[in-house]
Amino acid sequence: MSVSPVKRQKMESALDQLKHHTTVVADTGDFNAIDEYKPLDATTNPSLILAAAQMPAYQKLVDDAVAYGKKLGGSEEEQIKNASDKLFVLFGAEILKRIPGRVSTEVDARLSFDQEGMIQRARRLIDLYKEVGVGKDRILIKLSSTWEGIQAGRVLEAEYGIHCNMTLLFSFAQAVACAEAGVTLISPFVGRILDWYVANGDKKTYEPSEDPGVKSVTKIYNYYKKFGYKTIVMGASFRNTGQIKALTGCDYLTISPKLLAELSKEHVKLTPTLSVKEAQACDLEKIHLDEKAFRWHHNEDQMAVEKLSDGIRRFAADAVKLERMLKERMFSTENGK
């Protein structure tokens, strides 16, 4: 149904309407995009930081991170690791000057199967934020939603009061385990689920309400609300605005600048599709997953197994690229290259 030009001027944009029902989060490391769309929170990951670190506007942050790594000293590997952690925190601290809420900072994906390693790196990131005057209440630590990552989240929340954002979440089993671990927030990936079904099935297009990624997040949201879990559901990894609009009413949605721009130009009426009332009335049974049950149920979901391992590899590869960039900045001059 088309909207007349006069009504379009009076009607709020889809983005503004969405903000009435859902907390909108910017999925970017680009400060300009954050300034433009004024989200409550922002999320970053190794891929986004790698992209931003190569922009001329952010070279001062890279230089500061390099200087920090060198100042701490140690082996070449230790200096690069310290510079990398510092760079993530410097980006996060700058983002926090532009938003009222929290920023998500990701633990190295190469630690995805190392529970203690993730706990130590998360605490290190929180300490680095403290050094620049940012309290842990404004940080969400992103961890891969492996069994080890979920248990690291449990420990960080319960023993250290560090809030966690469980990322690379594709299966219902992952969502159940995260809820039972009492983590602050989960990021189920909508677009990457759709990608898998398009690549591996005969159907190549889906209506938003039938989109497998949208259906996955809807089921998780309904389960959490029906059984009173406090963990926030934040849909992530969107491919189009139809997916976003189909999840109106979800707790949080983290959205790329490209799709935020599209939503800001759309003038269609948005109606919440997710609600606590409807969730509490839906037909779902409560389940408990110990480690053995988690691994079995997750393993039964071929899409989730493949997308989790692929996501870890991709984030790890971008972390390696970022470290190579830092290594060149830190050591190429003194090596006479």
Image: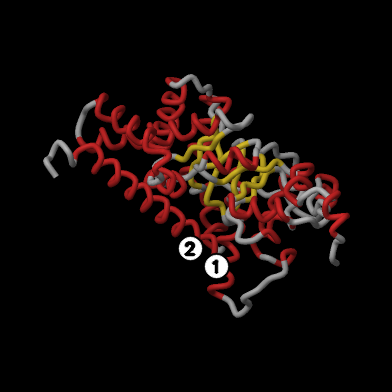
Residue 115 at x, y = what percent? 42, 39
Q: Measured from the top left, where is residue 248 in percent x and y?
A: 76, 51
> Would residue 157 be seen by someone viewing this image from the given angle?
no
At label 2, counting other C-alpha atoms closer than 10 Å, the crowd grade (few under 14, some 14-19, many 20 or more) is few
Describe the element under mark 1 as helix, strand or loop. helix
Residue at position x 87%, y 61% from top?
Answer: 4
Of pointers 2 and 1, the one earlier in the residue sequence? 1
Q: Is 222 situated left or right of 258 in this image? A: right
Colour setting: secondary structure
Q: Which mark is residue 157?
A: none
Q: Position of residue 319 (x, y in %)?
A: 36, 47
**Residue 256: image x %, image y %?**
58, 51
Asked whether 197 or 58 is in front, the reply is 58
- Helix, strand or loop under label 2: helix
Instruction: Look at 85% across and 67% down and name the residue there.
Output: 1
Distance between the alpha carbons at the discs numbered 2 and 1: 9 Å
Residue placed under numbered mark 1 in the picture:
196
Badge 1, how many Cα within 10 Å: few under 14, some, many 20+?
Answer: some
Front position among marks 2 and 1: 1
Pointer 2 and pointer 1: residues touching (CB < 8 Å)?
yes
Which quadrant of the figure has residue 22?
Answer: top right
Q: Is residue 56 left or right of residue 291?
A: left
- In the image, residue 17 above or below residue 311: above
Q: Foreground residue, 44 or 292?
A: 44
Vertical relation: 259 (above or below) 84:
below
Q: Quadrant of residue 178?
A: top right
- The amino acid pointed to by label 2 is Glu
Query: Is 130 in front, or is 304?
Result: 130
- Please, is residue 159 above or below residue 211 in the view? above
**Residue, disc 2:** 306
